[in-house]
Amino acid sequence: MMMMKNTNGSFGYAQMDKEDPEDMKHRKAQFMIYKTMQQADIASSSSSSSPIRIRICRLKIKFGNRLKRLRKSLIYSISSSVNTRVSAYRQILNQLKNLKRLVRIKQNLPTYTSTKTSHQPIFLTTSLI
C-alpha cells in the first residue's frame, strides 16, 4: 500500500514509498477495467443520447413504408384498370368476330323465294350484352 508523507517543504509535496509489484499490477488492472467501462458507457450513451437521430430514423422508416404502400397500391390499381380495359377490349373483339362469322354464314346460305315477302332480321344476337 502507498504511504504518503507530508514534508515540511514550502510547497507541501508528498513523498511516496515504493509500491509492491502485485499491488501495482492490481491497480493497473483496475485502471484498465475502469477505462474500458468508461469507454463502453460513452459509446452506449452517445448512440442513445441523440433522440433526434432516432426520431429521424423512425420517420424515415414510417415515410418509407407509407410510400411503399402507396406505390404498390398505385401499381395495382393501374395494372387492374389496364387489365380490365384489355379484357373488355378482348371481349368486344371476340363478339365482333362472332358477329362476322354469323353474317358470313347467313350470306352463304341459299335463299328461297316465296310469294310472301317477310321482313326478318338476318341474325339474332343474344350474346352482345
Image (cartoon, rainbow, N blue to C red):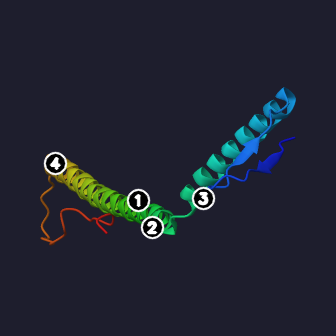
The x, y position of residue 123, in whole percent, is 22, 62
Residue at the image position 15 percent from the left and 55 percent from the top: 112
The x, y position of residue 79, in whole percent, is 33, 56
Q: CA distance from mark 2 to mark 1?
A: 14 Å
Between residues 108 and 31, which one lies in front from this camera angle? Answer: 31
Q: CA distance from mark 1 to mark 4?
A: 53 Å
Res. 45 mark: 3
- Marks 4, 2: nearer the viewer: 2
Residue 115: image quadrant is bottom left
Res. 23 mark: none
Q: CA distance from mark 4 to mark 2?
A: 67 Å
Residue denoted by label 1: 68
Identify the secondary structure beneath mark 1.
Answer: helix
Compared across the picture, whether 31 is left or right of 77 comes to: right
Which residue lies most toward the top here?
A: 21
Q: Earlier in the sequence, mark 1 or mark 4?
A: 1
Q: Earlier in the sequence, mark 3 or mark 4?
A: 3
